Amino acid sequence: MSGLIHWAEDVDEDWPSVLAELTRAFEAARSVAQGEESIVYVVRQDDLLGRRGAGNAIVACGLLSAARTAALEGARKGWTANVVAFDEADRSVVELWADRLLDDGSVNGELIRVGSGHIGKTLA
Amino acid sequence: MNGTIVVTGAARGIGRAIAEKMASTDPLTVIGVDIAPELALSESIIPVQVDLTTSEGPGLIRKAVEASGSPLLGLVNNAGITRDARLVNLTDDDFAAVLEINLGAAYRLTTELAPLMSEGGSIVNIASRAYLGNFGQFNYSMSKGGVVGMTRAMALSLAPHVRVNAVAPGLISSEMSMAIPEDIREKMVDSIPLDRMGTPNEIANTVWWLLTPLSSYITGEVVVVGGGRSLS
């Protein structure tokens, strides 16, 4: 397998902290895209719903949207971009899904949600 | 409604349509951010020119609200730019510029003004259908996805007194869309079930609805106004 598995880090509520995390994700994605390798962003399900503050929500939802755009661009070159969202899952389970997404180029632009916390909530 | 509404990016396009709609339909004072004084068409629109990417910018808007003498009822975060490029070619400067204006300015201004809505209020963030992904717009998509995340988090933190929603326009007839090469724009229109671009007034109507009590049980939602493009 090759590519990027980028775990979103918790941020403070101030804008510089948020921008720094988004910039880190951008720079990492650009680097692997230039090498035509795939991208997986890992975020918390709670953050997609805004449950842990605005800063973390901005990062999680921003990464999801960015991955969808990257997926469109990668589709023409043979690489993919996806997002894994988790709630109470073990890190090893999340890594398993992330690795699978890097290995299997047939899934692109998707949000894979590990766990059950998203059921009954808004679509991301 | 009787109070003050702040609209950013109000000099043209969607922002201007929103400001004019709000100024014409209710006894409101509208603070139009980015409007040069000579371009203010209505006496109900107070023009303010502020750089919202500076640390001083949001505070200057707050002072304008306080000077208006009426309670702040609404905020529309509309200001936005594009700097398009494929991810592999996207420069640091173009990434940062889009994030700062489309997202950072909205975040800082909302944080500054939300405490003024002590009597209740409604915040509408202008996202974009590009939050679902759009070729060549990694920075813009990320910024608008961030706006969606901000909307959801603030809908939770500011409830029950303040509602927070987002509107995600599709292809709208504006300076921004007119910058798209004509052949590409025509292909985009061909993919819209309603077979045309939207108008700034159609976005303004949706924003107006979200600002008024007509939508009083709606918060944390994203309303896509895109002619059905998300299905085709």
Image (cartoon, grey):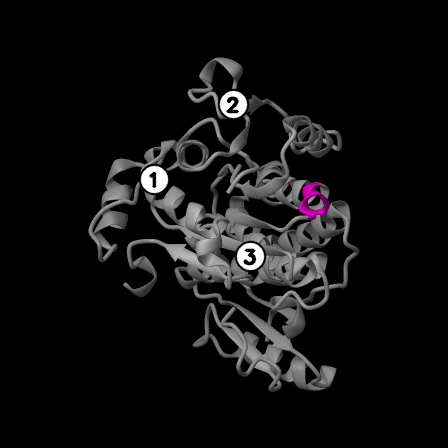
Question: Which of labels 2 and 3 is toward the front?
Answer: 2
In the displayed structure, would residue A94 be above or below residue B125? below
The chain letter for the residue carrying disc 1 is: B
The chain letter for the residue carrying disc 3 is: B
Question: Which of labels 1 and 3 is toward the front?
Answer: 1
Q: Mark 2 or mark 3: which comes first in sequence?
A: 2
The residue identified by callout 3 is B148
Report helix, strand or loop for mark 1.
helix
The residue identified by callout 2 is B35
In the displayed structure, would residue B1 be above or below residue A21? above
Query: Which quarter shows the C terminus of chain B?
Result: bottom left
Residue B88 seen from this side: no
- Residue A71 picture location, percent across and down: 47, 62
**Badge 3 density bin: few <14, some 14–19, many ≥20, Cα 10 Å:** many
Badge 2 amino acid: Ile
Circle number at residue B201: 1
In the displayed structure, would residue A97 be above or below residue B19? below
- The answer to which quarter of the image holds residue A58 is bottom right
Q: Mark 1 or mark 3: which comes first in sequence?
A: 3
Q: Is residue B63 magenta?
A: no
> Are discs 2 and 3 located on one and the same chain?
yes
